[in-house]
Image: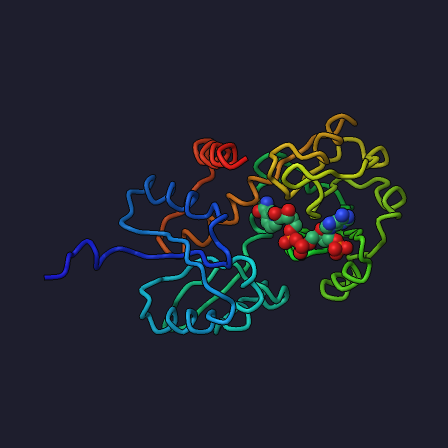
Amino acid sequence: MPDSRETLTIKAFVTGYPVKHSRSPLIHGHWLRQFKIDGSYEAVAIEPASLPDFMNGLRSGTNGFVGGNVTIPHKESAYRLADRPDDLAQELGAVNTLWLEDGQIHATNTDGFGFLANLDAYHKGWDRTDKAVIFGAGGASRAVVQALRNRGVREINVLNRTVSKAQELRDRFGSNIFAHSVAALGEVSAGAGLFVNTTSLGMDGSEAPFIDFSKLASGAVVTDIVYVPLKTPILKMAEEQGFSTVDGLGMLLHQARPGFEKWFGKKPDVDEELRSLIIADMDVHA
Ligand code: NAP
């Protein structure tokens, strides 16, 4: 007789290469315990060359998963291998969340949702501004730019060391986006109500150059999607210059919500207990 508990267990995954660093199992494990769901969420390391096989196993149901997350370096390949990427994913060309429906792999990208939900949670009203400055034009910046445009921010200025990458975002996301070199910061930050760091500067104790925020609108919000350390050098500089800040951990936590709901059927919340759990893990690995 098969174990009836085993047959009911709902299985989801996160895959990357490597994937050991992922905090997603901690997040989903917390919610599984909170809802007392008979489910599992496991980290599965898949080499890039083996991703097509893994996706085939997901589609056919042979690996037993209902869906999962994909992280670096699989976000673009998983987009190409999915059967039904949604509109957000098609515009981005990258996905982080997969789920199986009627034998097809559906896919979306929830980074932009996580980014906005974090700002909404910590600084209600941040979106009254018409003008934002985004520092960085890498993979994560794309989702941030798309989310801000979709929220209705009319002027989104993207500054990047490699200007061609900022121009690529402008070409991809349309006429509300303006591409600049980093040297244009003073000029383009005048009157902006939101500054977002999406570069990896300041991550894991690395240094960040001084940023003069004085031209931002009064009451502007500065946020950093880097969340290790929680208070990054850029957030410190903004606080010292009198601006409100929002750290990037909430983006990571909120981006996990839509996937959990798809796989396990419950709407999870981001609470202080979850935040503390991840902060404790960051302290252990500091
Ligand atoms: P990425 O694709 O490698 O992009 C890195 C960005 O940082 C590029 O714009 C790059 O500029 C810039 N950069 C790197 N070193 C620089 C330097 N010395 N001077 C100026 N600019 C520099 O990385 P990503 O995937 O977008 O991730 C960026 C950061 O966001 C990482 O720290 C990641 O952990 C974090 N993140 C957080 C969340 C969250 O949930 N909170 C989600 C995703 C990512 P060039 O184009 O000129 O190289």
The quarter holding residue 177 reads bottom right
* Percent coordinates x, y for residue 276 in the rendering: 47, 31
Q: Taking 182 as reference, is 204 above or below it?
A: above
Horizontal and vertical percent position of residue 19: 48, 54
Say which of 153 and 178 sits in front. Answer: 178
- Residue 38 appears in the rendering: yes
Residue 285 place in picture, x, y as percent? 51, 37
> Is 151 situated left or right of 195 in this image?
left
User: In front: 271, or 123?
Assistant: 271
Quadrant in which the C terminus appears: top right
User: Is 83 situated left or right of 237 in this image?
Assistant: left
Q: Residue at 84% across / 39% down in the picture?
A: 191
Identify which residue is drawn at 42% across, 73% down. 53
Q: Which corner quadrant of the image does residue 251 belong to?
A: top right
**In the image, what residue occupies the spot 58% across and 41% down?**
118
* Colour approach in the figure: rainbow
Name the quarter where the N terminus is drawn: bottom left
Q: Is residue 114 left or right of residue 7?
A: right
Query: Is 183 placed above or below 47 here?
Result: above
| Residue 155 can be seen, yes or no | no
